[in-house]
Image (spheres, rainbow, N blue to C red):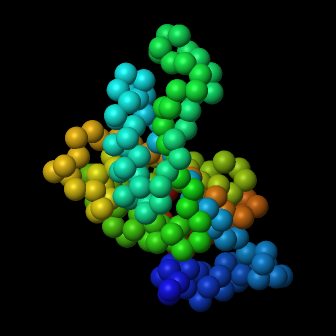
Amino acid sequence: MAEARLYTQYKTEILPKMMEEFAYANINAAPKLEKIVINVGVGEAIQDKKVLDVVVANIAQITGQMPVTTKAKQSISNFKLREGMPIGCKVTLRSRIMYEFLDRLVNLALPRTRDFQGVPDKSFDGRGNYTMGIKEHTIFPEIDTDKATKIHGMDVTFVTTAQTDEEAFALLKHFGMPFKRRN
């Protein structure tokens, strides 16, 4: 099986640029993308359990990997939420599937977003990881918009081996992440 297009691009183009830009002594010191975690919280799953099944199917279709359902950690009586109730799902993408998802996200899904100005560059956590929110799952080409009954969002977290936010920003920028223009 051939390797993902973005991984080949990382090895041939991005890695040498990062080595030159940050003057790393060793090729292993250069940051790389470790994993992408997609998390969806489904608040409506408290009333209707079938909503969560639809969301799980959508995320499986988008990522090509079956998500794990997440359960409530504590009970909240105001929301009629009990500890252990399924209220969301998440999926962790690594290696080839991760690079293919990133390719589709950057080149197909994000440009299809309505009034797209770029993703915010303020969502780094201080340790080289970046999280972004997507409001509609229908921006992915795998989802048939005519059959989509419930529109949900998702959080996408990019976990890198970068030590600083500056290095992670440069890495994601080289991968083609469309960050907003700074004024």
The residue shown at (51%, 41%) is 69
Name the spot of residue 160 as percent of width and height, x first: 66, 62
The vertical placement of 76 against 180, above or below, is above
Q: Residue 75 lies in what quarter of the image?
A: top right
Asked if one can make out residue 156 in the rendered structure from this viewpoint, the answer is no
Name the spot of residue 143 as percent of width and height, x first: 28, 56
Taking depth in this image into account, of 6 and 125 the one nearest to the observer is 6
Name the spot of residue 38 as percent of width and height, x first: 51, 51
Name the spot of residue 118 as percent of width and height, x first: 41, 57
Q: Residue 172 lies in what quarter of the image?
A: bottom right
The vertical placement of 43 against 101, above or below, is above
Asked if one can make out residue 87 in the rendered structure from this viewpoint, the answer is yes
Taking depth in this image into account, of 81 and 115 the one nearest to the observer is 81
The vertical placement of 183 against 33, above or below, is above
Residue sticking out furthest to the left: 146
Taking depth in this image into account, of 72 and 32 the one nearest to the observer is 72
Q: Residue 105 lies in what quarter of the image?
A: bottom left
